[in-house]
Image (cartoon, rainbow, N blue to C red):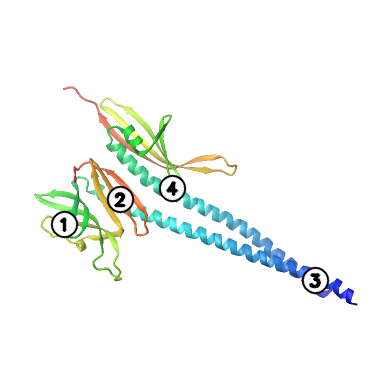
Amino acid sequence: MSKKAVGSGSPRIIQSVFVLLLLSLFAVLSTFLVTIGAQIYRHSVESAEDNNNSRVMTAVVRSAVWAEDGGEVIVERLDNLDITALTVVNEFEGEKYYKRLYCAVDPDPLDGEPRSFLWESYTSEEAEFRVESGESLCELKSFVPSIEGKTLKVELESPNGTKSTIRIALRAGGAEE
Amino acid sequence: MKEGSRANALLVELLLVIFFFMISAAILVQVYADAKLKSRTAHATNFSMIEAQNVAEDLYAAENPEATLTEYGFTKEGDSWSLEKDGYFLRVALREEETDSGLLRTYDVSGVEITRNQSGEEKENILLTLPSTRFIPKEVSP
């Protein structure tokens, strides 16, 4: 009697263990797949963010310089505001106009959180330069312009740490430091 | 007998579920691999574009373009110059056109990515090409 019970119970145990094993395999593989998917998704998003940041900040600076390349391009240090600006000076009817690209913290942020931006301002010689007189273009951590001969070099860093360097050959205008 | 057939049915059901899961997993892994490759290509395209713009600008301004390319780290390979970067390489090729009034010098700066096809062979994928053209006028005697 007892032998019969053992004989009929053993395959059932094996079957149950096999089912459990299959279920565990299913669970492990599902977790593995989800983990890999999450990693790839995160990597893709980070990479897309890096690409966007570097493309936006370099395109903004390049187009701003190319648009005004007819003027005199200078690197201007504004000690009172602790800002190094890339300035293009144009003269119309005897009056000088300054187009400045610079990086500064937003003095009046909408959400109250101080963040650093790339700014563009266009002012006449008579107008006093202030940070908020410009327009914020995109978020930027650092902006270091320099001029080597006829080549303008700008080192940029986005808020997430992506660094880019752009070099522009100044065509029409002269370059001064 | 009834219990046995129920257990068998459960087993078959589980096997079917795992079979479909495996098919879905195989498709998903392919999709993930594709996404990763596309992301890598986008990254290479973006950064090679920024680098190529810089090289094109420097070549436009350079009086001695070969010295500029050497300064960047380019090495000469036949008719072109190449520089290996992270995930891509830059290639510069020169085209010159002699005219009556001077020389039209064009440097084609390309961003190239190396990809492998399904049989494992390496293949060049040209991501972008930027021309940097400069006209060098001839000296005209008065």
Residues at circles 2 and 4 in contact by the CB criterion of under 8 Å: no
Disc 1 marks which amino acid? Thr
Mark nearest the camera among 4 and 3 is 3
Residues at circles 4 and 3 in contact by the CB criterion of under 8 Å: no
Q: Is residue A126 above or below residue A169?
A: below
Disc 4 marks which amino acid? Ala
- Which chain letter goes with mark 4? B
Q: CA distance from mark 4 to mark 3?
A: 57 Å
Quadrant of residue B6 in the image?
bottom right
Q: Is residue B117 left or right of residue B21?
A: left
Residue occupied by mark 1: A123
Residue A168 placed where, x, y %?
Answer: 28, 44
Mark nearest the camera among 2 and 1 is 2
Residue B3 placed where, x, y %?
Answer: 80, 74
The quadrant in which the N terminus of chain B is found is: bottom right
In the picture as drawn, the residue positioned furthest to the front comes out as A2
Residue occupied by mark 2: A155
- Which chain letter goes with mark 3? A
Badge 2 marks a residue whose secondary structure is strand
Q: CA distance from mark 4 to mark 1?
A: 39 Å
Residue occupied by mark 4: B44
Q: CA distance from mark 2 to mark 4?
A: 20 Å
- Which chain letter goes with mark 1? A
Badge 3 marks a residue whose secondary structure is helix
Of marks 2 and 1, which one's residue comes earlier in the chain? 1
- Which chain letter goes with mark 2? A
Disc 2 residue crowd, few under 14, some 14–19, many 20+, Cα 10 Å:
some
Residue B42 is marked as none
Disc 3 marks which amino acid? Arg
